[in-house]
Image (cartoon, helix red, strand yellow):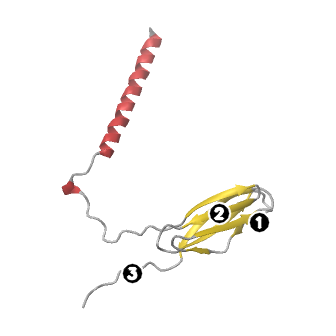
Amino acid sequence: MHAIRHGVGAFASVAVLLTGVALAAEVRAAPVPAGERPAPAAEEPENFGASCRTDVEGSRVTAHCQNPYPRTDRVRLHVECERWWDVDTDSAPVDVGPADYAQLTGRCWKEVRAAWITHQPADPEPVPSSSGP
């Protein structure tokens, strides 16, 4: 009988927990009434950044980047090597223009610990022109 009480208590605790999670999800998903919606920001940030993926094969790293946005993205490949004596490398910056593709490579003498891409705008953000007299 003692084991049954613990089982019922555990079941009740799980039921209360799941009900709370479901209720929280409903509250988060509830739409905001039209009158209470925040005004859109005056200047929305432009989508930016090439879509990149890295492939590691042994001690070699290849990054493939494709830019779907209208601004040029300056990308760099960074390779961190596993061995303490192996030199980590950073590639030269490569500009990936709108609808353009770039491939970057790097390597270690032995194993690769990590590889990643950094992004930087290659051209200044366009300034909206004012059509005033």
- Label 2 element class: strand
Residue at 43% from the left image edge and 22% from the top image edge = 10
Outermost residue on the front side: it is 99
Q: First in sequence: mark 3 or mark 1?
A: 1
Residue at 47% from the left image edge and 69% from the top image edge = 69
Judging by the rendered image, the residue that carries numbered circle 1 is 87
Look at label 1 and name its amino acid. Val
Residue 51 spot, x, y in % from top left: 54, 63
- Label 1 element class: loop
Outermost residue on the top side: it is 1
Q: State how far apart marks 3 and 1 are (Cα).
A: 42 Å
Crowdedness near tag 1: few (<14), some (14–19) or many (≥20) residues, C-alpha within 10 Å = few
- 17 lies above or below 12: below
Residue 90 sits in which quadrant?
bottom right
- Label 3 element class: loop
Quarter of the figure that contains the N terminus: top left
Residue at 35% from the left image edge and 80% from the top image edge = 128
**Which mark is in front, 1 or 2?**
2
**Which mark is in front, 3 or 1?**
3
Outermost residue on the left side: it is 35
Q: State how far apart marks 3 and 2 are (Cα).
A: 32 Å
Judging by the rendered image, the residue that carries numbered circle 2 is 63
Residue 62 spot, x, y in % from top left: 68, 62
- 51 lies above or below 132: above
Q: First in sequence: mark 1 or mark 2?
A: 2
Look at label 2 and name its amino acid. Ala
Q: Is residue 90 left or right of residue 130?
A: right
Residue 41 spot, x, y in % from top left: 31, 67
Residue 127, disc: 3
